[in-house]
Image (cartoon, rainbow, N blue to C red):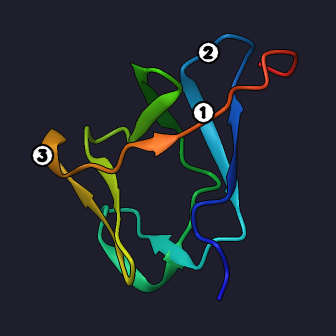
Amino acid sequence: SEDRSIFTIIPLEKRSNKVYIEANATYLTSANGEVGVTGFRAYGQVWTLVDYGFESFSLKNNHGQYLSVHDTSVCLTDKPDKNTIFPITIQTDKW
């Protein structure tokens, strides 16, 4: 099975916390924020990188919903305690 934790985050401009996500992801978010089983379509949507320090972050969409990733599903939540905090290593030369 594919590793769903691997994706690339691309800032809209250098040092920006507004990002696009590139992933070989099998998750789709529809325009109204509902998540379909076919996948999570990161591209085309601008996400806000919420930095927790210590190279960890979460992702928030323009409706204020956080990305919440589980073993078998992905959903959006407006509850910060339910969001997924991802480990990240920022490639500062590219950021």
Image disc number at residue 19: 1
Image disc number at residue 16: 2
Q: CA distance from mark 2 to mark 3?
A: 24 Å
SS for callout 2? loop
Give the residue displayed 36% in from the left and 79% down from the top. 73
Give the residue displayed 85% in from the left and 22% down from the top. 94
Q: Residues within 10 Å of mark 2 (few under 14, many from 20)?
A: few
Q: Nearer the viewer, mark 3 or mark 1?
A: 3
Q: CA distance from mark 3 to mark 1?
A: 21 Å
Q: Nearer the viewer, mark 2 or mark 3?
A: 3
Pointer 3 with pointer 1, Cβ within 8 A = no
The residue wearing badge 3 is 79
Q: Is residue 58 above or below residue 91?
A: below
Q: Quadrant of residue 10?
A: top right
Camera-side residue of 89 and 63: 89
Question: In the figure, is residue 26 to the left or right of 84?
Answer: right
Q: What's the amino acid at mark 1?
A: Val
Question: In the figure, is residue 43 to the left or right of 77?
Answer: right
Camera-side residue of 53 and 18: 53
Q: Residues within 10 Å of mark 1 (few under 14, many from 20)?
A: many
Image disc number at residue 47: none
Give the residue displayed 47% in from the left and 31% down from the top. 56
Give the residue displayed 44% in from the left and 33% down from the top. 57
SS for callout 3? loop
Q: What's the amino acid at mark 3?
A: Lys
Quarter of the figure that contains the C terminus: top right
Pointer 1 with pointer 2, Cβ within 8 A = yes
Image location (x, y in percent) of residue 84: 34, 50
Camera-side residue of 10 and 56: 56
Q: Is residue 11 above or below residue 5?
A: above
